Each structure stands twice: as structure tokens, then as C-alpha cells.
Amino acid sequence: MRIGLGYDVHQLVPDRPLWLGGIEIPHTLGLLGHSDADVLLHAICDALLGAAALGDIGKHFPDNDPQYKNIDSKILLRRCNELLSANGYRVGNIDSIIVAQRPKVGPYIPQMRQTIANILGIDPGAVSVKATTTEHLGFEGREEGISAHAVVLLLPTESTN
């Protein structure tokens, strides 16, 4: 078994869609980034790559590479899962948290869990997504940005021999 930890943060800005957990959330602000800036999927990607000792999201999908400009983070998560498989690992489970004062994301969590599970080919019961505010403290509390944390458990791919 291998355990990985991921973290990501992006600034909230006008005139951008807000993507979290692979779904678009209605909000007046969106996250600024080279890709779609989905902090939850980025944190999960970093946790997956870290658990397998494969580096981080910036190593595999650098923000100075034009091919990743505005890329859908679901594609990045799928590619991370392919890297895991090629290195003999599969996802056991994920525990994650979104830190945002607004918008309230609770109603969207079941769809996020299903989306993440579908991409990774795992049961939605193996994907935990939680959300919290910071009681108006820090950059999240001032609604300047959103962050996400993720912890994953990787298991060896079962051999067919």
C-alpha cells in the first residue's frame, strides 16, 4: 500500500467558470489557472502521483506548455490514473476536502464523487469529498480563492500470473 497527499489552491476571479470535482458549479467567480483550475481534481492528481513517487502535476502537465492551456482537469486525472496503472498501482480510496467560504458546494458533492469514481474506474463509495468554510478567516474566508486537500491510498495492481 502507498499513501499520497495532495494540495492545490487557485485565486477566484470574475469571467471564469468555476470547476470543482469535474463539474461546473454556478457562481459569480471562477478559478484562475492555466487549465480549468479545478483545485479538487488537481489535489487528487498530486496525491495520486505522490503516492506512486511519480512527481507532481506540474512535472507531468507544466503550466508553460500550451497543450495544457484551458485543459479539462478530468483529462489530467484520467492521465494520472493511466500513469498509476502503468506503474503497477490502482486507487484504493480517496478522502478529500474543498475549503471555500462560498459557494456552498454540498449539493454538488454526490455528482463530484460519481464523476471522480467514473474517471478512475472505482466505486463512488471509495471517493470521499467534503467541504468546509474557514469562518471568514484567511484567503478562502475572504473569498479570494479556494483550496483543496486530498489523501489517497494506492494498492498494487493485481497480477494475472
Image: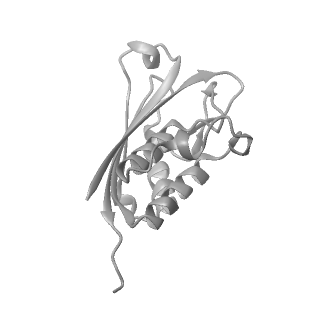
The figure's colour scheme reads one colour
- Which corner quadrant of the image does residue 33 belong to? top right
In front of the other: 125 or 74:
74
Residue 91 point in image, percent of width and height: 37, 60
Which residue is found at the position 45% from the left and 20% from the top? Answer: 140
Indicate left or right for 130 with 78 as reference. Answer: left
In front of the other: 155 or 16:
155
Q: Is residue 88 above or below residue 68?
A: below
Residue 116 point in image, percent of width and height: 48, 54
Indicate left or right for 8 with 14 as reference. Answer: left
Split into 4 quadrants, where in the image is the C terminus?
bottom left
Residue 132 point in image, percent of width and height: 36, 29
Indicate left or right for 155 with 48 as reference. Answer: left
Which residue is found at the position 36% from the left and 70% from the top? Answer: 157
Q: Is residue 158 above or below residue 32?
A: below
Which residue is found at the position 48% from the left and 49% from the top? Answer: 112
Looking at the rendered structure, the number of numbered marks drawn on it comes to 0
In front of the other: 62 or 129:
62
Residue 101 point in image, percent of width and height: 45, 22
In front of the other: 120 or 65:
65
Split into 4 quadrants, where in the image is the N terminus?
bottom left
- The residue sitting at the left extreme is 1
**Is residue 20 visible in the rendered structure shown here?**
no
Q: Is residue 55 above or below residue 93?
A: above
- Which corner quadrant of the image does residue 160 belong to? bottom left
**Is residue 94 visible in the rendered structure shown here?**
yes
